[in-house]
Amino acid sequence: MSIRHSFDNFSPLNEEIDTSTPYGFHVEMIAIRARELLANRTDEQLKESLDTLSWILEEGTKIEERAADEALSDESDRDTYVITSTNALRSYMPLFDIKDQATFPEAQWPEYFALLSLAYIGLALDDSGDEEMKQLVTSIGVDPSTVDTQRENNRLEYLLSAAEAISTAEALHQLQIDKQKIHARGGQRRAAKYAALKTFVIDEWTKKYQQMSNRQAGKKIWKTLPDDLKGLLTTDEPWHRFATWIGQHQRRS
């Protein structure tokens, strides 16, 4: 079964995980982590977005294969070109715009990796075709227990893929949080400097330039303004801003 059908028999946000099954505890832990990143979504949104995720991986694979063909001149080496779905999705991030989707509004890349993790969990838990496969292999003289063995091997592979995807989702999410904190601190520093600029302008006007028009005072103050404060204004005629501040101060006084 492909990722595109992972949720055919699995409710990504609401399915109860049986922890008594092989690897069940680990599956549940991964599901909890993925669902936390997708807490503001609905099952329906995730099921519809799975189609988009599958398309991204399919289209990205074509791009990746073309890149591999160009990078590997020796055809014998091409069979060694292997990439996991998580690594593939990371490679494709710059190539796809995921923002403007009606079914998955304001989508973020950490959500897509969490979605990929849940998709692999869906695959790990799906045994819907096992009985038919056992009947088939039995009909051709193969021990049907091989189906169970292969199912457990696949389950472990899907579990490892789900763990890789959710770890990447959490790392990207934390990176977003860190960037937001840095941006907020930068904004606070700029706001503090801007307040210092306004204080400087009013102090200079109060001490030296009350007898002038506000515009004339603004021009005088601009000439004496420290360089580190000048960089806060990008307007061509910053003294107009100074005149406005002086006027506001006058009205408040």
Image (tube, rainbow, N blue to C red):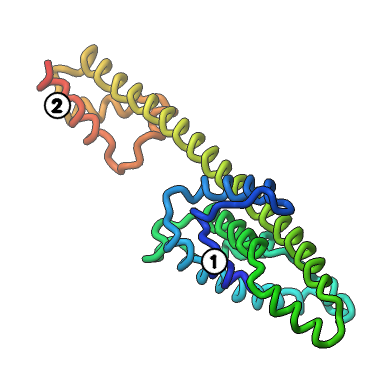
Q: Is residue 115 above or below residue 68?
A: above
Q: Earlier in the sequence, mark 2 or mark 1?
A: 1
| Figure quadrant of residue 100 | bottom left
Residue sitting nearer the eye, 157 or 171: 157
Q: Is residue 221 above or below residue 122?
A: above
Residue 174 point in image, percent of width and height: 57, 41
Q: Residue at x 29, y 24 (%)?
A: 198
Mark 1 belongs to which amino acid? Answer: Phe
Characterize the local packing of mark 2: few (<14), some (14-19) or many (20 or more) Cα atoms within 10 angstroms: some
| Figure quadrant of residue 207 | top left
Residue 16 point in image, percent of width and height: 55, 52
Taking the view exactly as shown, the residue that stands out farthest to the top is 207
Residue 165: in sight, yes or no? Answer: yes
| Figure quadrant of residue 152 | bottom right
On screen, residue 108 versus residue 208, left or right, reads right
**Which residue position is annotated with label 2?**
247
**Which residue position is annotated with label 1?**
7
Q: Residue at x 29, y 19 (%)?
A: 199
Residue 46 point in image, percent of width and height: 48, 61
Mark 2 belongs to which amino acid? Answer: Gly
